[in-house]
Image: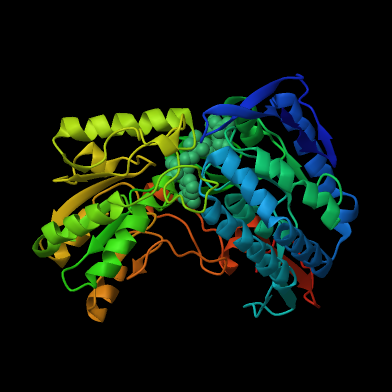
Amino acid sequence: MEQFKMYIDGDFVEAASGEWFDSFDPFTGKVWSQVAAGGPADVDRAVQAAHKAFTSGPWSELTASQRGMLVHRLGDLIARDAQKLAEMEVQDNGKLLAEMQGQVNYVPQWFYYFGGLADKIEGSVIPLDKKGYFNFTRHEPLGVVAAITAWNSPLLLLAWKLAPALAAGCTVVIKPSEFTSASTLEFVKLIKEAGFPDGVVNVVTGYGKDVGEPLTSHPLVRKIAFTGSDATGRAINQIAAKSFKRVTLELGGKSPNIVFDDANLEDAVNGAVSGIFAATGQTCIAGSRLLLQESIHDEFVEKLVSLAKTARMGNPMSTETQVGPITTKPQYDKVLSYIDVAKNEGANLALGGTPASRPECGEGWFIEPTVFTGVTNDMRIAQEEVFGPVLSVIKFKDEEEAVKIANDIRFGLGSGVWTSDIGRAIRMSEKIQAGTVWVNTYRAVSYMSPFGGYKDSGVGRESGIEAIYQYLQTKSVWINTGAKTGNPFVLK
Ligand code: NDP
């Protein structure tokens, strides 16, 4: 069975404990590989290596253009190996090969974009209110970054952190999810090949408690870039606050996908189905609350259910498959428990609601695409993130009520509005409290456009020019151009 070692200071190494943990294939439910089980000693080695690389040695000597070229080269290598990396992600997280191919083929763009940005970060000359001084600003890298990722899109979520961090001049210690570490460990082979000095990028694998916690609390880590649940994000934010570490937190969501009666219904049905069932609902931006205007509710639900019924489930490696398994056994159990919650709250089951017993699903962790109607926004099934193929349908009367329901939640990550009225589209985009509003589309993201959450969905933004500043700090430099250094006891 394949064993994956950690990557510290330019070498692939076993954990200090010599222990390994199993990684499962969600399609078969069986162990397919083993990963080094890191602990605090491994974290310390990796952080020390990253700190050394940041403060001395070749990385700290590079010009911004040289750094940018390395980041760009890394993008080229990912593009070269995209197929292999995508297949590894499918084996580890069970998402569809077609989706992971699309995703991994897109990942190089983050490295091209931020590689290009590396030498365009300019300070300013400040005009100043005082004579005899010259004042300018510099944007300097923060130092060692802890990059912690979730299991649903390991390499994409990593690229969102790694590309701006490296372009800014930081060094990085990565901790992938214990459920999906393999693709990250395959990916770091490219770090050496691209020519990054040892210690600039490190990976420590293991559990949140054994690796995540010591990493986030390590005194030499200056910034934590995290994607995961809001519960873990909250815990990390508290740890970070103790030593004033910067954070970028990309957390969960319960995004409203809102359809008005003036929308193109065919498009909206397609958007609603892909909003919740793409990636088997395991995306932070899943449109898991479908808000339907009363006048179109019944017709829309009928169309939605008939389309969702056609979804082909099975082997995620097959191009025929449209809905894959749930990535982890605990998540599978969690999704089923939420289906019980919804039933007990009195929601009407309009589709699915059971484990999938289709022969093509074998022993894997599959759940039928599930739709609940008659949901009210105060129910747990409307307020809590399921992170699975479970849709809650909520009725609304008019624009005002749609906005009220959309915002009456602690999350604010994504949102969708389906309408043919441009005025309404603009009004809704102004009123919805979410980091992203999609109008007549859903799920689009780009390396150029900032992504992140309002409210409990997160802190900071990834992608877009703004993202690189989350890895930089500003220094103000004052130079005396002739002002007399006078008597210190006489204030000017
Ligand atoms: P978790 O919060 O459980 O885990 C995320 C990462 O944090 C994992 O690597 C995990 O390690 C690690 N971790 C766990 N405990 C700690 C700790 N105490 N200190 C430091 N690190 C820790 O989330 P999931 O992996 O279950 O991912 C699903 C969640 O991610 C969903 O809520 C989803 O909405 C969110 N998400 C958000 C996105 C966004 O951009 N906003 C995108 C994708 C997902 P381990 O796996 O070893 O426990």
Which image quadrant is residue 118 in?
bottom right
**Residue toward you, 27 or 423:** 27
Q: Quadrant of the N terminus?
A: top right
Residue 116 visible in the snapshot: yes
Q: Residue 164 lies in what quarter of the image?
A: bottom right
Closest to the observer, 298 or 260 = 298
Give the farthest residue toward the front. Answer: 359
Q: Residue 462 placed where, x, y %?
A: 55, 58
The spot of residue 38 in percent (x, y) is 70, 27
Instruction: Tell me: residue 490, above or below residue 155.
Output: below
Residue 453 horizontal side relative to residue 486, left or right: left
Q: x, y (%) of residue 269?
A: 27, 62
Quadrant of residue 78 within the rendered picture? bottom right
Q: Is residue 482 above or below residue 492?
A: below
- At a point 75% along the width and 46% down the height, the residue shown is 188
Residue 379 at x, y percent in the picture: 20, 39
Front one among 227 and 278: 278
